[in-house]
Image (spheres, rainbow, N blue to C red):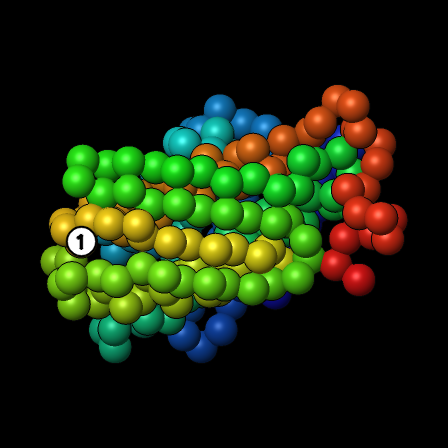
Amino acid sequence: MSIERQPNLSRIATVERKTKETEVFVSLDLDGDGIYDIDTGIGFLDHMLEQLSRHSLIDLKVRVDGDLHIDMHHTTEDSGIVIGEAVKQALGDFKGIKRYSNALIPMDETLTRCSIDVSGRPYLIWRVDLPRPKLGDMDTELFKEWFQAFAQAAGVTLHMENLYGENTHHIVESCFKALARALRAAVEIDPRTADVVPSTKGVIGS
């Protein structure tokens, strides 16, 4: 894996990861406008990552060349790993961020909550039951894998809860939108503490 952190105060990162299973490229800007350019080879996953970008206001470019002839697992998981790694790198020393946030997102009959702590300590609580085993050709069990990979690589504590819902598409999409809104608020710079790491230890993740 190669990582490039841009100079100066911009919160931009580029990460590339190559294995025998996937080749993944991600570039992002935490202080963007929600502009996206996504191509994972999986249409529904592209749609979800577009939602993540648009509602977090994180500019996001993703390219994945994966072993889709086997299944969609490696492409899904590895995209989460590399996006998470890029978020972590773009945050740098974590100074000034609000760190904690949550979002409650309705989508028609569905209501989903995301709570996040940008703590440097990866953890996922996944209380999301998906009624259907597939969306199109995609196994719905892979969405937990994406969120697990993202939380681990980004170093965030992430609690995802679908409070209620019936439509599998709505439930999954509300999860990505809830993450987007919570992440957007958590990584925002608080002008009152712009030069301070939000931890009594003075560092994040130790």
Q: How many discs appear?
A: 1
Q: Nearer the viewer, residue 154 or 67?
A: 154
> Which corner quadrant of the image does residue 79 belong to?
bottom left
Pointer 1: residues within 10 angstroms few (<14), some, or many (20+)? some
Is residue 145 at least partly visible in the picture? Answer: yes
Measured from the top left, where is residue 26 in percent x and y?
51, 49
Seen at 80% across and 47% down, the residue is 199
Query: Can you say whether 167 is above or below 131 in the image?
Result: above
Query: Can you say whether 72 is above or below 165 in the image?
Result: below
Left or right, residue 44 beside residue 201: left
Which residue is tagged 1? Answer: 168
Seen at 44% across and 77% down, the residue is 20
Query: Can you say whether 128 is above or below 183 in the image?
Result: below
Seen at 64% across and 49% down, the residue is 118
Q: Nearer the viewer, residue 50 or 15?
A: 50
Identify residue type, mark 1.
Thr
Quarter occupied by the N terminus: bottom right
Left or right, residue 86 beside residue 124: right
Measured from the top left, where is residue 66 in percent x and y?
35, 66
- Asked which secondary structure carries label 1, the reply is helix
Quarter occupied by the C terminus: bottom right
Left or right, residue 148 beside residue 93: left
Measured from the top left, where is residue 184 in percent x and y?
53, 34
Is residue 80 at least partly visible in the picture? Answer: no
> Which corner quadrant of the image does residue 49 belong to?
top left
> Which corner quadrant of the image does residue 173 belong to?
top left
Left or right, residue 84 beside residue 46: right
Query: Can you say whether 163 is above or below 104 in the image?
Result: below
Measured from the top left, where is residue 131 in percent x and y?
16, 62
